[in-house]
Amino acid sequence: MKDDVQFMKLWDLYSPLLTQTQKEITDLYFNFDLSLGEIAEQKGVSRQSVSDCLQKCRKQLEKYEEKLGFCEMLDSVSREYSAYMTETERWIAHTEKTYPQMQDALNDLQRRLHALHEEFGVEVIELSGDEPQG
């Protein structure tokens, strides 16, 4: 299951680099949840060919990630975004009563972070802790 999630992350990023047949087979298997037999029947090939194609695609996508590192970079950006968002929300809550003059600036920062989330679709990761850092 974890491998499938990682595969789909890689597939989302690197599928344009696959052949049309590879894209179709991986799409049918992972996105449409068809079995190897169903895909083989639809494509007019053997189940073994479908299985081989999926294994080859997985290795190929892993190689792309190893060389290019886009998935790792996006994960890092998501974590960083979440940390900034969490910190901003903490500061807004903390300064609401004690530093009301900072509210507009912090609310503006929060709007900008949300705009980045909307534009780039970074995943929000909830971080624990109540008090602002720094």
Image (tube, grey):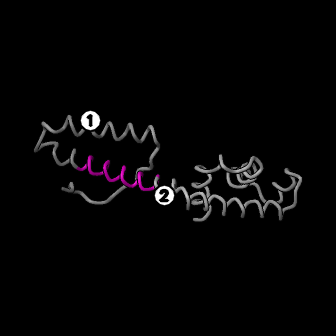
Q: Which residue is mark 1?
A: 108
x and y percent of residue 49 in the render? 83, 61
Region rendered in magenta:
74-90
Q: Which residue is mark 2?
A: 72
- At 41% from the left edge and 51% from the top edge, which residue is drawn? 77
Q: With respect to residue 91, does 2 lie above or below?
A: below
x and y percent of residue 97 in the render? 12, 43
Q: Is residue 74 left or right of residue 97?
A: right
Instruction: Give the CA distance from mark 2 to mark 1.
Output: 29 Å
Q: Nearer the viewer, mark 2 or mark 1?
A: 2
The extreme front residue here reads 67
Q: How many marks?
A: 2
- At 62% from the left edge and 53% from the top edge, which residue is drawn? 11
The extreme left residue here reads 98
| Amino acid tagged 2 | Glu
Q: Around disc 1, counting alpha carbons within 10 Å, would you say few (fewer than 14), some (14 to 19), or many (20 or more)?
A: few
> Counting residues from the N terminus, which is met first, the one under dot 2 or under dot 1?
2
Q: Secondary structure at mark 1?
A: helix
Residue 81 lies in the magenta stretch? yes
Residue 35 lies in the magenta stretch? no
Q: Is residue 88 left or right of residue 121?
A: left
Determine the image quadrant of residue 133.
bottom left
Viewer-closest of 123 and 71: 71
- At 16% from the left edge and 42% from the top edge, which residue is drawn? 96
Quarter the N terminus occupies: bottom right
| Amino acid tagged 1 | Asp
